[in-house]
Amino acid sequence: MKKRKKPVRKFNRKMRTKLIVLFSGIVAVLCGLIGRLMYIEYTSGDKYEKKVLSMQSYDSKTIPYQRGDIVDCSGTILATSVAVYNVILDCSIMTDREEYVEPTIAALVECFPELKREELESYAKEKKNSKYIVLARKLPYNQIQPFIELQDAVDEKGNPVHPNIKGVWFEKEYQRNYPYGKLAASVIGFTSSGNVGTTGLENYYDDVLNGVNGREYGYLNSDSDLEKTVISAQDGNTLVCSIDSNIQSIVEEKIEEFNEKYTDNYYEGDGSINTAVVIMNPNNGEILAMADYPGFDLNDPRNLEELYPKEELKNMTDEETMDVLNGLWQNFCVSATYEPGSVQKPFTVACGLETGTVKDNMTFLCDGGEQFDRWVSCVNRNGHGIETVRSTLMDSCNDAIMQMTYKIGKENFLEYQSVFGFGQKTGIDLPGEASTATLVYTADNMKPIDLATNAFGQNYNCTMVQMASAFCSLINGGTYYQPHVVTKITDAAGNTISTVEPKAVKQTVSESTSLQIKDYLYSVVTDGTGGTAKVDGYSMGGKTGTAQKLPRGTGEYLVSFMGFAPYDNPQLLIYCVVDEPNAGDEAHSYFAQNIVREILEEVLPYMNIYPDEKKTGRNKGLDVTGQNAQYTGEHKPVKKRNENQKKEEKEEETKQEQEKEEN
């Protein structure tokens, strides 16, 4: 009897259907999961990555950004950030195996002689678990290079020569460096720790110069493999300035020479309390040079040893030292206010011409001064005699200017004071610009004597940048440009981010008035009080200034000269202020004129401004004693004011200002 065969089970349709459905369901779920994961990665990948990293064993390291450079108009680097390195010891790695300790310490001592073996061995014994020990700070790359080469050395087969050097790494950071030291110190400024701009452009453009730190995350995954995630640092932007480093260096050299010339055994103290110069392009408001004296080294801004004897420094309190430093770091051209003196007179004349109250053909009789509630004298106590408008500026006649104010009136005068920007900030892109709003008169408190003295630059205050910017509008056809130092901002790769275009703020005077004022000022230099400043062979215009300081009658003056060249098409304006020249008789603008002439003798050819007049071969410069053909008075040594005298004078000045406001 045959055995019945077992029936063969068939994979019937029903089973196939179930399997397809099940497989399709699994595929659909997988696709859904993949889609969901892709969505999460796209929308929240960084967030979940950080969560995962936080649950792993990992190390993180900051990647520092590089602060942006500051360069001059031709690309010369004035401020930059240089990479430096801290030597870091991870003792937990070095002591992980006994055979790592000796080779690592030996390599450190060999490559960094300042490190002591005994100290390193104590770390190995007492700080085994420490991951971060700073062995040396802020070393340039050439000092760490020998260790890196030793650590990375390989033989012919590519195997490490020193495989047991472990636990040493280098922390990169950036240190601010100023290649030219003192050059343009008060303009550039410097940074404190943490890339914080303290003064100058470093402070004003702090956010532009600073970047954003990056981050490197290192962690061990489940297979104990080291994984890394790197977020790159974003470097700061670069400032391109209108400052020309060559012009700036000429200016600073001449200022320093003047102060050295007037600092000797005969004259006690420095050549002046302050000496400052601004050079501008009158046609767009760009600052080509801005300097004051004394300066300081941007790489060592707190060093006072060049200015004070060591014994005196030792006796200074911390508060006194900071007061001295703050005064040293201050940009006189922007932050200091003073009575400008006779450089104001062209503005008074321009106001009269614009309002029609003063005509070119008018004459005035100078008899030595004008009587108000007190006598206000002219520079020539005996009187200049008959003065035209032109000769009023040529002779710098106070009396004639005061008589003009009778015609101009205080309403017109104050209106044009505002038009020219006196009493207002210029908006220059530098920190610490002084406000002079409370240092000028209003219609309510201006008396006739105040109008008369304001007209020749006394009894109100301004800043250098305020005066220079306003003067530019007098000689460029009447356009007031906002002064500025930065012309362009670029990124770390050199791509332009933004350009600072010249900003024409307003029209101060008509073109005809501007031409007339230029013509008058040309006469001041050729035949008037400004002859000492003239550069032989060049047509120039300008105005002298001699302001008697408060309290009056002490013999202390702030003298100045404002000049421009060439006369018919000014390409630069220069303004020099000497605050209390160190001479027996301070009341002479020749001190400032000399500095201006010496600067322009080098700057004009450098700027490719060619001589446009016949040379005369005459030089009206002062000699070292402060005398010249136009002044033969005896110079007597004077002792500079001590701190108590300065304090008393400041209190007296404040008192007078308060009385003026009350009136």
Image: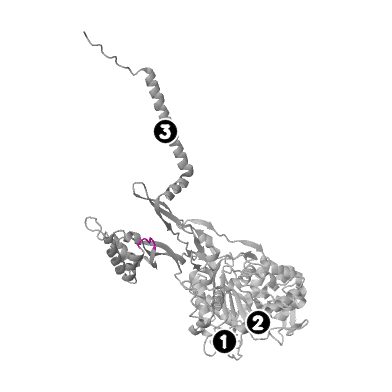
Disc 2 secondary structure class: helix
Residue of label 3: 30
Q: Badge 1 local density, few (<14 within 10 Å), some, or many (20+)?
A: many
Instruction: Please tell me the numbered disc located at residue 258.
Output: none
State which region is magenta: 128-132
Residue 572 to residue 377: above or below: above
Residue of label 1: 626
Choose mark 2 or mark 3, whichever is in front.
3
User: Which residue occupies the foreground of this view, 22 or 281?
Assistant: 22
Choose mark 3 or mark 1, whichever is in front.
3
Asked whether the residues under the numbered discs 2 and 3 touch, taking CB atoms below 8 Å apart as contact, a structural biologist would say no
Can residue 292 be seen?
no
Can residue 141 be seen?
yes
The percent position of residue 510, horizontal first and vertical second, equals 68, 65
Per the model, the C-alpha gap separating discs 2 and 3 is: 87 Å
The percent position of residue 208, horizontal first and vertical second, equals 52, 60
Residue of label 2: 649
